[in-house]
Image: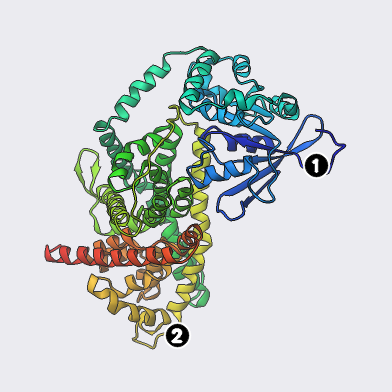
Amino acid sequence: MSREDPVKRHTAALVGNPNAGKSALFNALTGARQKIANYPGVTVERKAGRLALPDGDSVELIDLPGSYSFDAASPDEDVTRKVVHGEFEGEAIPEVIVLVLDASNLEQHLVFAQEVLELGRPTVVALNMIDLAERDGLTLDPDALSEALGVPVVPTVAVRRRGLEELAAAIAEAEAHADEDAHKRWHITLPERRLAAKHMARAATLSKSTRHTVENGIDRVLLNPWIGPVILFGLLFVIFQAVFAWATPFADALEGGVGAISGVVSASLPSGFVHDFLVEGVLAGVGSVVVFLPQIVILFFFILLMEASGYMARAAFLMDRLMAGVGLSGKSFIPLLSSFACAIPGIMATRSIPDPKDRLTTILVAPLMTCSARLPVYAVIIAAVIPQTTIGPGVGLQGLVLFALYIAGILGAMVVALVLRHTVTSGAASGFIMEMPRYQLPRLKDLVIGLWQRAWVFLRRAGTIIFTVTIVLWLMLSFPKAEPGESQMDASVAGMIADGLHPVLKPIGFNREMSLALVPAMAAREVAVSALATTYAVDAEDEDLAAEGVTDRIAELWSLPTALAFLAWFVFAPQCISTIAVARRETNGWKWPAFMVGYLFVLAYVFAGLTFWIATALGL
């Protein structure tokens, strides 16, 4: 690759199985020189960047989606096949293929490697994550692997930038290693490829410790069809207990801080627009959401811990049998699991599901997973109406109720999926193949960065979406001004809206404030809390009531059946507008998002009503 042919477009593509570390390698090789777009006609992202070569030249490096075969079984794999074979119009055929293999899972990755080598293109192998293989007690011989494959093999550790210079040099010289007889050599059946992969992996492994035996023993327990689910749900139970037990001191401190700032502002500013804006709008509204940051951080701490340790993939494997019972597969579990953080990445993650009806069903039920935006709503209602008592050693009633709400969302999603798979998205469940990552101790730095990113996202939402919607609601609650003796809520524009909604929601136990809070909650779930806080602050008769937190006002004004009905509504209610927009993009139209919103509203109304009526009948 010389400078003498500037017109020629030099391209290289990163190809390999999922979880081979391609994206980390791509980021390490290209740095900030990246462009992200979509491939024409599909929603799969196209990531490309410039890779500088040792001779001063450069190539366009493309990070292709992970694939197990060119016999595409999903939209992601189809994109990889089309790019490699030059089937995308306007997309150059990669001149060099960088085949990324996971050194700690060599045998599995060598199956697809043979299919890539059959193309006969200039190819370089990046034997990635060699550090994890060494940590696991594997001593590999890259030269032996290179001889077996017939192409250069470069050991790399993308996250530590090891082997990058050697890899770039190999890419620059790759055209000299093109194998004209590759098609004859590697054109074999899948069983033959599996057998060849086994032999090559053994030949390239110089030594192996007993760590693999230990890990297999752990998996025999954690993946046991009877013991495994018990451990999984026990772990989830502990997590939700911790969300309340660990977060309470920090949440109380934040709430006290917001209250202290509100007191200072009230004492410093005279009554008027600015005073009310800060106290009733900003501090009462946005502040009521920010105090739940500790619960968000603790929840994500456990999620990140499960992901980094390798347990999350095993949880997906355990859920495969349950998913198959409702017509889905374990492939749907990862998108649904992602929806616990936010339904938007969960819906986008369905691109890896090969069966169209399987994928559509997963998109339609993803909003039933309890996203982190619901947590502030659950936390404030539970804290207001559920006693902070223990019902056993280390088991708090509030944490138990939170756990039950998450389980209700999961069970609701499974039942809806079963109904959909026998009606509008009928079809057979697809198979499920998944690699089990190695167990590893999470790095403290990675956990801290992950928690900071998620905390920042939450705070950014509080400072943008929640702030904007809360201020708009405060303005609607504040004007027109009430006459002497008249409730501000009754006189305001927001009160008129609440009056229109209340007759529809009154039969299921909702009061006017709750009815009004559902409107801004369509922008973001957490806004329901700030909407209630702002409403009660504006309608307060004196400064002392205005200074009370939303939890105290709910405890004073709501009955237990009413509060439980509100919780039931948020288990099933439709997601935010952003989620609906992503569902429209992923389904290429408004038909299915409209269907999703419709059935979720019906479920929310029915189950909120049932909860209220049953709780009232029981005398709660």
**Figure quadrant of residue 306:** top left
> Is disc 2 placed on a helix, strand or loop?
loop
Q: Nearer the viewer, mark 1 or mark 2?
A: 1
Closer to the chain start, of discs 1 and 2, is 1
- Percent position (x, y) of residue 263? 44, 64
Work out whether 194 lies above or below 502.
above
Q: Is residue 425 visible?
A: yes
Decide which of 523, 21 is in the foreground and name it.
Answer: 21
Can you say which quadrant of the picture contains the C terminus?
A: bottom left
Decide which of 606, 454 is in the foreground and name it.
Answer: 606
Decide which of 499, 344 is in the foreground and name it.
Answer: 344
- Amino acid type at circle 1 is Lys
- Percent position (x, y) of residue 238? 30, 40
- Alpha-carbon distance for marks 1 and 2? 68 Å
Among all residues in the image, which is located at the extreme right? 4
* Label disc, if present, on residue 480 of the rendered structure: 2
Please name the residue that numbered disc 1 is placed on: 8
**Figure quadrant of residue 49:** top right
**Figure quadrant of residue 506:** bottom left
The reply, left or right, for residue 22 in relation to residue 179 is left
Q: Is residue 559 visible?
A: no
> Is disc 1 placed on a helix, strand or loop?
loop
- Percent position (x, y) of residue 265? 49, 66
- Amino acid type at circle 2 is Pro
